Amino acid sequence: MIFNIVNQLLLALLVKDTLSSPSSSSDPVCIVGSGITGLSAAHKLKEKGYSVKLFEKNNIVGGKLHAYRKDGIVWNMGPVLFSEFYTKTFELVKKFNIKYDNHQYLDLAGYQPDTGITLPLPQIAKGLLAREAWARYQKIRKNYTIETGLINANPELFVSTSQWLKNNNLQALLPYALFFLTAEGYGHVDDTPAIYFVHLLDLAKDIAVDFKLIPDGFDQIPFALAKDLDVTLNAKVSKIDRSEHGAKVTYSTESGLQTQECSSAILAFPPLLNQVSNIISDLSDEEKDILGQVKIIKYATIANYVSNMKYIGYAPIIPPPFPPKLDGGVPAAIVNHTRGAAVTYHWTRGEFDVGPTDEELALYQSQNDKITRKVFPAKDTQTNLYVKGWDYFPHVTTKSLQDGFYKKFHTIQGKSNIYYATPLLGLEVVEHSIRSGEYIADTF
């Protein structure tokens, strides 16, 4: 407890030395990126009295909360489900009066990629072993400290998810991990650190909980958040000059090259070294070493039309092993977004610095067309209506965690008035993305 308090005091002193109060500067806080993390940080800063300006490279806000629409049907190309335990997400849904439907999230099936044969999967929540394991986990969880920022997380979580389940006699939760971690693109259970899986479990609370879906699109949340914010769309940030007194953002729009003086700048996108160094030329060796440890998953979502989806989710688990070799482009999951909207999720196993290439996206589409038509052979099935590649799930490896990554990452927050608002501070789901944005704003 004393160690935690000392850490927080040191962080507060660091912030006090590097940031200006709202009244001490007429320049806004500049946020690069208008995904849910950047928008959440902006709202929190406005509540604290700061002037805020956002720069978005695309022509629409929302980042991964992105939807494709056609003929009255909505495909969520990023997040699709949430629960009442997504407390901050649910607050926004209720605040903006956004309509949602309830769904039983464990209404799942497995499919065989070669034949398209499907079989219903046993409901995890009804299994005696799973319920007993869940009860044991709830007792174990009380011993962990896993706050947003992760600087005081327990070292026993710095192992792979599969190893952590084994260490704690929780193997009965492996099916849950295989579908909601691995199939959804958060890496293989043998690779992904347990700290991220526990963050995911924290949003379940009970493995029998129902989930909710926004039929008009998850992007209704960022659209509502952005209405009272100063956002410049189609703004390509090419350079950020930083100093102890502030930052200057250079960006281009249709009107040409422009600059904006800022009291400080927040980078609200995955803090990959190659992306940050493209706009900040004077990174120190320490910053390069820390940011160089951040990795992502090559990931893509593809919109399809399927009129006869019986289950809410399908995964390629017949026959074992699961998951199959994911660098072959096989859909790791097929999810029913209702009204005929079916989204396939594709990712490649490994630790990467860049998202999927055009060649990899083409492979995903080829496999999607072949497999989706086998699983859903109806004549009206349509594939590859829309494809979106992502820099997904910013994270670090178990080795980086064991070497103290998050404490090191916090030492560069606020350096020369540059901050990093990123789901890396938790887990890339909507709830933790909101919390990560607010967490950075709370350091001002």
Image (cartoon, grey):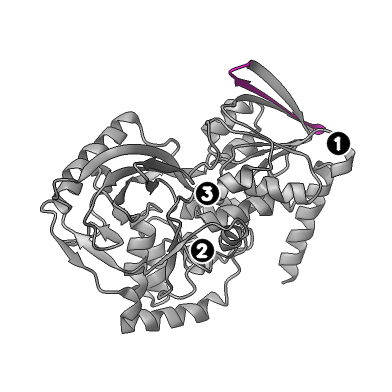
Estimate how packed mark 3 is, as few (under 14), some (14 to 19) or many (20 or more) residues with alpha carbons within 10 Å. Answer: some
Q: Nearer the viewer, mark 2 or mark 3?
A: 3
From this viewpoint, which residue is outermost toward the top? 256
Q: Is residue 346 left or right of residue 444?
A: left
Q: Is residue 193 magenta?
A: no
Residue corresponding to mark 1: 25
Q: Is residue 423 left or right of residue 383?
A: right
Check contact, mark 2 vs mark 3: CB within 8 A.
Answer: no
**If the image is split into quadrants, where does the N terminus sit?**
bottom right
- The image quadrant that residue 431 belongs to is bottom right
Q: Is residue 294 left or right of residue 20?
A: left
Residue corresponding to mark 2: 199
- The residue shown at (18%, 45%) is 380
The Cα–Cα distance between marks 2 and 1, rounded to whole angstroms, is: 37 Å
Q: Is residue 424 visible?
A: yes
Q: Position of residue 301 (x, y in %)?
A: 35, 44
Q: Is residue 60 above or below residue 65?
A: above
In terms of sequence position, does the residue under pointer 2 or pointer 1 come before the other? 1
- The residue shown at (20%, 48%) is 372
Residue corresponding to mark 3: 220
